[in-house]
Image (cartoon, grey):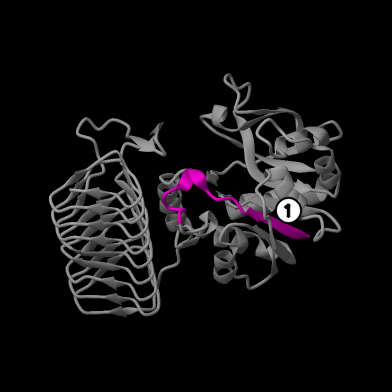
Amino acid sequence: MKAFILAAGKGKRMRPLTENTPKPLLPVGGKPIIQHLIDDIEERVDEIIILVGWKGEMVKEKVHSEKAEIKFTKQEKLLGTADAIGHAEKFMDNNFICMNGDVIIPKDSLHGFIDFFEEKNEPTIAMAKVENPESYGVLITEKEKITDIIEKPDKPKSDLVNAGLYGFTPKIFDAIDETEKSSRGEYEITDSLQILMDQRLLGFEIKKKWYELSRPWDLLSANKELLNQTLEENVKGDVEKNVHIEGKVQVSEGASIKEGAYLKGPIFIGENAEIGPNCYIRPASHIGKNCKVGSAVEVKNSIIMEGTQIPHHNYVGDSVIGKNCNFGSGTKVANLRLDEREIAVIHREEKVQTGRRKLGAIMGDEVKTGINSMIDPGTIIWQKSFIGPGTIADGEIGPESKIQ
């Protein structure tokens, strides 16, 4: 058995986080999204083939497997998911597992799916129940057989949706060859699956929660639950006296935790990060490599990517902060509306309901804030922007903006 992971897309709905970083490398639960996929499937397959595209070299540098051989292939033009899966043909001489690179499925559910696929020896789709099926490919079933697939219907007839995990036989390549371009000019996997469905297409329901990571704030929910479920308590860095560590906390090599730091897990701290003195890191926080969380700083339920400096008198809650940002003294990120209602954001000039009551900032790479600046709940700041001293930032702030 081999596995094929689709990781070639540009992750447009994840911008600004994906302006410089391929979506599969965004951190969640202490490691890149794609590394979760590899770690969970490697003991069930001999080879893992990863389809890369934009900035594929970064993916090649970051991923690893202890139990399976990893190979790469490149999709030069993004012509749809069916075209992407077609790149697997030269690697596959038998049945294989195919996974979207932006979903994380619990390990036992993933292995249960593989067991089912091996037993049935028929093309199979993983299915999951969701509260908003109108946003997905909805599956209509008759016992274990899929009888219809409807993309994003206005009035869904089922709450079972395509979970982005497939078991394919070589029949899939014949179906892809028969697939015609859609109105969007792409080869849609839904059309290929319809062809398989005319023969026989099975569904396997995933009972546990799965994560489709489409929007930046999706990372926060997945990060919280994955840290709770999978993080291993392990302190490799240097910890000074009078540091309080409570719960599961992982401190990577080269990191330093200075006197007066209060860490309440689950927390992941990356290599060479500097924490403290006299700071408070609350549960479900991911502090990346080479980051600084300094004196009188509080971080809660946030992902802070590598190289970012939050050095003094700052509050960051329920936020995703990109690489190499720098917070001026006194910068505060608000994460709760005064009326405590659900937070909507302006994302790529579109108003989007996040489904979250608490959401701070989504910040691209290399953003700088001046002293005593304030960031309203649900603010999205694109890369290389500057938020001036004492300024209130809100809404969506475009790339390389200066707000003063």
Q: Nearer the viewer, residue 45 or 155?
A: 155
Answer whether residue 240 is visible to the viewer in this image. yes
In screen coordinates, is 18 left or right of 205? left
Where 269 sits versus 181, above or below? below
Quadrant for the N terminus, please: bottom right
- In percent of width and height, residue 223 lies at 43, 53
- In percent of width and height, residue 349 lies at 39, 35
Q: Secondary structure at mark 1?
A: strand
Is 22 one of the magenta-colored residues? no
The magenta segment is 1-19
Residue at 84%, 31% in the rendered image = 198
Residue at 63%, 21% in the rendered image = 157
In screen coordinates, is 194 left or right of 159? right
Q: Nearer the viewer, residue 194 or 205?
A: 194
In screen coordinates, is 377 left or right of 304? left
- In percent of width and height, residue 401 lies at 29, 49
Where 137 sits versus 256, above or below? above
Where 378 sits versus 270, above or below? above
The residue under label 1 is which amino acid type? Ile
In screen coordinates, is 346 left or right of 99? left
Task: Write down the quadrant of residue 54 in the picture.
Answer: bottom right
Residue indicated by mark 1:
97
Label 1 CA crowd tier, 10 Å (few <14, some 14–19, many 20+): many
